[in-house]
Amino acid sequence: MEVKIGVQNAPRELVLDIDTSQEEFEKTVTAAVQSDSVLPLTDTKGRRVLVPASKIAYVEIGREVTGAVGFHL
C-alpha cells in the first residue's frame, strides 16, 4: 500500500510503499500523534523512516493492492 506523508517545512512529501493494512497504519499514526512521539515506518525494501509526529502536516493512505501482477494500461 502506498502512503504519502506531508512534513511541515519540507519541500517534498514522503512516499512509501508499506506492507501494513490501512487500519493498522491508521492506528499507528493516530497513536504517534496522540502521544506526540515519533512515527516509525518501514517500507517494503526495508528502509526505515522516523517522522516526528508533531511535524506531520497530512497523511494520505492509498488503497491496498493484493496480488497485482502484469501491466496496467
Image (cartoon, helix red, strand yellow):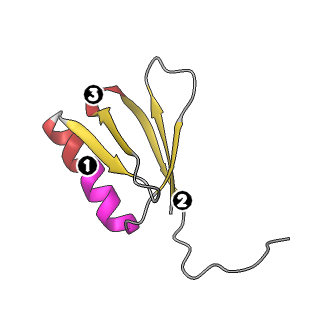
* Residue assigned mark 3: 54
Q: Is residue 73 above or below residue 34?
A: below
Side of 60 where 52 appears, left or right: left
What's drawn in magenta, residue-wise?
A: 21-29
> What is the x, y in percent for residue 33?
24, 39
Specify which label sits upstream in the sequence, 1 or 3. Answer: 1
Side of 15 where 28 appears, left or right: left
Residue at 33% x, 66% y: name it: 23
Q: Is residue 17 magenta?
A: no
Q: Is residue 23 magenta?
A: yes
Q: Secondary structure at mark 1?
A: helix
Residue at 54% x, 34% y: name it: 13
Cα gap from disc 1 to disc 2, whole angstroms: 17 Å
Q: Is residue 25 above or below residue 60?
A: below
Cα gap from disc 1 to disc 3, whole angstroms: 12 Å
Task: Kindly report the secondary structure that dominates the magenta region of the rendered protein.
Answer: helix
User: Which amino acid type is marked by label 3?
Assistant: Ser
Q: Secondary structure at mark 3?
A: helix
User: Which amino acid type is marked by label 2?
Assistant: Gly
Per the rendering, the mark at residue 30 is 1
Residue at 54% x, 66% y: name it: 63
**Would you call the spot at circle 3 few (<14 residues within 10 Å), some (14-19), or many (20 or more)?**
some
* Residue assigned mark 2: 62
> What is the x, y in percent for residue 60?
50, 49
Q: Of residues 46 and 37, which is closer to you in this image?
A: 46
Specify which label sits upstream in the sequence, 1 or 2. Answer: 1
Cα gap from disc 3 to disc 2, whole angstroms: 22 Å
Side of 34 where 18 appears, left or right: right
**Would you call the spot at circle 2 few (<14 residues within 10 Å), some (14-19), or many (20 or more)?**
few
Residue extending farthest to the right is 73
> What is the x, y in percent for residue 7?
44, 28
Residue extending farthest to the top is 9
